[in-house]
Image: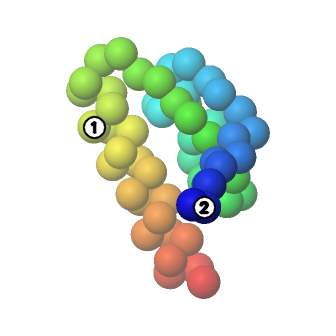
């Protein structure tokens, strides 16, 4: 059986709405973020999708 490991450079609380998540995504780094309120998770998902689109069109 193969084992897979995710290398995580940073773990931040309240990360998803901060610029850290976008910064790490643009640098192609792994990250884990936590958010308590559901509405902020949805906003963060939208922001990260925008970064994905920008990176796709720049490539």
* Residue 17 position in % (x across, y down): 47, 31
* Residue 49 position in % (x across, y down): 39, 57
Can residue 4 be seen here? The reply is: yes
Asked whether, in this view, residue 52 is left or right of residue 26, the answer is left
Asked whether, in this view, residue 50 is left or right of residue 20, the answer is left
Q: Which type of secondary structure does the marked residue at label 2 adopt?
A: loop
The residue lying at 75 percent from left, 39 percent from top is 9
- Where 24 sits versus 14, above or below? below
Q: Which type of secondary structure does the marked residue at label 1 adopt?
A: helix
The residue lying at 25 percent from left, 24 percent from top is 38
The residue lying at 49 percent from left, 59 percent from top is 51
**Residue hosting label 1:** 42
What is the crowding at mark 1: few (fewer than 14 residues within 10 Å), some, or many (at least 20)? few
- Where 16 sits versus 1, above or below? above
* Residue 30 position in % (x across, y down): 64, 48
Q: Earlier in the sequence, mark 2 or mark 1?
A: 2
Distance Cα–Cα, label 2 vs label 1: 34 Å
Instruction: Indicate which label's residue lies in the foreground, 2 or 1.
Output: 2
Q: Quadrant of residue 37?
A: top left
Q: Quadrant of the C terminus?
A: bottom right
**Residue hosting label 2:** 2
Q: Quadrant of the N terminus?
A: bottom right
Q: What label does residue 26 carry, if any?
A: none
């Amino acid at each position: 059986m193969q084992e897979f490991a995710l290398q995580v450079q940073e773990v931040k609380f309240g990360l998803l709405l901060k610029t850290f998540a976008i910064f790490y995504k643009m640098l192609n780094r792994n990250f884990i973020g936590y958010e308590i309120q559901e509405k902020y998770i949805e906003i963060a998902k939208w922001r990260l999708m925008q970064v994905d689109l920008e990176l796709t069109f720049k490539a």
